[in-house]
Image: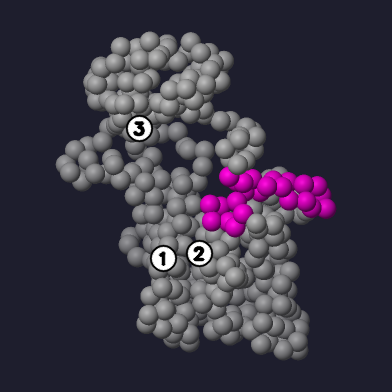
Amino acid sequence: MTALSDLKVLDLTRLLPGPFASLVLADLGAQVDKLEDTGMGDYMRHTAVPMAGGMSVGFQGLNRGKRSLALDLKHPAGVAAFKRLAKRYDVVFEQFRPGVMARLGLSHESLLEENPSLVICALTGYGQNGPLRDRAGHDLNYLGRSGLLGLMGPLDGPPVPPSFQLADVSGGMWCIIAILAALRERDRTGKGKIIDIGMLESVIPFAAVALGRLLGGELPERGNELLTGGVAPYNTYLTSDGESITLGALEPKFLMKFCANAGLEVDMSMLMPGPHQAALKVRFAEVIAGRTRAEWEAFNAEHDCCIEAVLRPDELRGDAQLAARGVFFDVEAEAGSFGQFRTPVTPRELQARPAPTQGEHTRAVLADAQFSPEEIQALIDQGAAR
């Protein structure tokens, strides 16, 4: 028995944001039934390389442990089947643009009317209201409009796109929190609710420190803030072997230990942003360039002053700490083995549960909702399901 083993989620999301959220719910024990269209289905199946067993490895990592049914929500019979299905779930999770569900004849309000205890989570780029509600967008767009990208360097040009999808994942994480909170409220009241999560505002809390200054009347400077590269003791540096390390000696005790053992004269002004930091960064860079990454890791092991290696992606699976935490594991498939990752809440004893093929469980999911074999076959024959 796991935490959410009595929870049933009907998941209409695709690509990264929603599937990440429903993956976490599945890892916590929920039954997640992934509803895909009868055409391409979730684009992530085919568009993220490499491939293994006919599906991208990225798709398999985000959709393990789920069931898949293929239903055409533009077909009247498919819409009718969805309405019938939705009555048997605790959560309906969708990621369409605002108004799409209503145009399909499946408005949030109508679903809640049919199933008053239903929790409906709608994840969009800009939310269900506001002048941008209907605008298309992707992760980089949300980071830009949220102001987070504006806090990133370099100082002499446009910000560099990050190598990860912060808005997508944070949007999914806020959905998880909101869904669990709504379910807790339902425990008390018996009533479901409609949840509106926008990826744009989902990333703003990540800039809480800089925003504290902004909301207090000061304008944060890109790349010159304490936590955004503005001070020498909190920065990234090249080592003598061409690798990189992070130095996070923000607290006086760590700064003093670092300087005392690295041959630098300590001065508490090192922790204050300002014009003097330019010369300090040069001096710190010279000192750090005098040793290899491994030597700095050994230095930190001895002195504990917040130095950490910048690992290359190809080094992650061999990292002792990540291995001890069981972050990565191998999946054996017909096309050969491939790696997957665990979320922080994935049970350690969980064996790899494969991602479903498109529509693999259509008959089983419909049968669970008390569709007869004849009704299921009729939906398939009409092209409303597959």
**Which numbered disc flags the more N-terminal residue, 1 or 2?**
2
Q: Secondary structure at mark 2?
A: loop
Residue at left offset 48%, top offset 85%:
115
Location of residue 376 in the rendering, given as x and y in whole percent from the top left corner: 72, 84
Image quadrant in which the C terminus is located: bottom right
Residue annotated with mark 3: 228
Q: Mark 3: which amino acid?
A: Thr
* Magenta extent: 325-348
Dots 3, 1 in contact, CB < 8 A: no
In magenta stretch: residue 210? no
- Compute the Cα span from label 1 to label 2: 15 Å
Could you tell whether 183 is left or right of 7 in the image? Answer: left
> Looking at the rendering, which quadrant does residue 134 occupy?
bottom left
The amino acid type, in three-letter code, at marker 2 is: Gln
Give the secondary structure at mark 3: loop
| Amino acid of disc 1 | Ala
